[in-house]
Image (cartoon, rainbow, N blue to C red):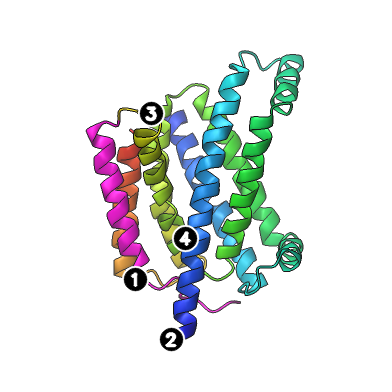
């Protein structure tokens, strides 16, 4: 793996997960949705897109997406996709340290097993 | 207790919707893009013509619709559930795609992929045993 490939895998994993974490933060600001009728769902979506974290999340996800497109122009998909399985561990770390979620030992074990499983499925 | 049970129930329903919309959207998008043929040049005129053809395809619009429903389900479940719960739990989508490929498309699934599928099931089961929400809303 060349340093450039490793750098892009790092950008994809970190930007992608920070994007998802920002989206999660934005939705926690909105609060738990209890009513699922179309009008209320529309209200929730409009409110969500007024939260700055939603736009930060969308921007970071776009960075991850275009970095993935760029990386796939020179690296094999069989290397890139399994490597991005590391996202599950990075995401759980971000959830614990940035969002203050309580990731207990049981959840960590599950996350690591899923991460290995996804890497094997994508090889 | 009853609230916790109902929260777990709606989390499972939304995760199921996320996985269904996300997996079928990805499969249709892939099928639609393959029907278009590859993008062989990034010259602006060729790229614009390629994407114009993409937006002319019913399959691609259906895929976009499904992926938008995926995003809405994802946003809704994150309004109460932990990201560290939703993210690994949604990996069950890989299992769904592998099973659909095997049973409906007659694809050969190599042993390493079956091992991966089994590990994902175990991991999702373990994560599913934890409570979906561990934080108070800010």
Q: CA distance from mark 3 to mark 2?
A: 45 Å
* SS for dot 1: loop
Q: Report the disc number at residue A104.
A: 1
Q: Label 3 marks which chain's residue?
A: A
Q: Residue A47 falls in which quadrant of the image?
A: bottom right
Q: Report the disc number at residue B1.
A: 2
* SS for dot 3: helix
* SS for dot 2: loop
Q: Please give the residue where the numbered disc 4 appears in the rendered image.
A: B86
Q: Are marks 2 and 1 in contact (CB under 8 Å)?
A: no
Q: Label 2 marks which chain's residue?
A: B
Q: Position of residue A91 (x, y in %)?
A: 45, 56
Q: Report the disc number at residue A78.
A: 3
Asked if both marks, 4 and 3, belong to the same chain, the answer given is no
Q: Are marks 2 and 4 in contact (CB under 8 Å)?
A: no
Asked if both marks, 4 and 1, belong to the same chain, the answer given is no
Which residue appears at 64% of the width and 31% of the height? Answer: B59
Mark 3, mark 2: which one is toward the viewer?
2
Q: With respect to residue A15, does B75 lie above or below?
A: below
Magenta stretch: includes residue A27: no
Q: Are marks 3 and 1 in contact (CB under 8 Å)?
A: no
Q: CA distance from mark 2 to mark 4?
A: 21 Å
Disc 3 or 1, which lies upstream in sequence? 3
Magenta stretch: includes residue B134: yes
Q: With respect to residue B60, does A92 lie above or below?
A: below
């Amino acid at each position: 793996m060349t340093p450039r490939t490793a750098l892009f895998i790092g950008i994809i994993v970190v930007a992608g997960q920070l994007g998802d974490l920002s989206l999660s933060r934005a939705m926690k600001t909105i609060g738990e949705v209890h009513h699922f009728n179309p009008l209320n769902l529309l209200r929730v979506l409009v409110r969500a897109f007024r939260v700055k974290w939603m736009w930060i999340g969308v921007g970071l996800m776009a960075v991850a997406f275009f970095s993935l497109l760029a990386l796939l122009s020179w690296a094999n998909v069989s290397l890139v996709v399994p490597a991005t399985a590391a996202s599950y561990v990075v995401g759980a770390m971000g959830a614990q340290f940035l969002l203050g979620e309580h990731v207990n030992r049981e959840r960590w074990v599950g996350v690591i097993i899923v991460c290995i499983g996804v890497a094997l499925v994508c090889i | 207790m009853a609230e916790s049970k109902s929260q777990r129930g709606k989390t499972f329903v939304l995760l199921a919707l996320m996985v269904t919309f996300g997996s079928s959207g990805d499969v249709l998008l892939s099928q639609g893009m393959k029907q278009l043929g590859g993008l062989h040049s990034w010259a602006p005129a060729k790229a614009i013509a390629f994407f114009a053809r993409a937006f002319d395809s019913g399959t691609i619009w259906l895929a976009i619709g499904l992926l938008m429903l995926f995003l809405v389900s994802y946003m809704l479940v994150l309004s109460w559930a932990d990201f560290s719960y939703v993210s690994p739990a949604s990996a069950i989508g890989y299992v769904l795609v592998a099973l659909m490929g095997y049973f409906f498309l007659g694809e050969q699934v190599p042993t390493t992929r079956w091992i991966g599928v089994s590990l994902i099931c175990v991991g999702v089961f373990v994560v599913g045993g934890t409570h979906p929400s561990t934080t108070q809303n800010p």
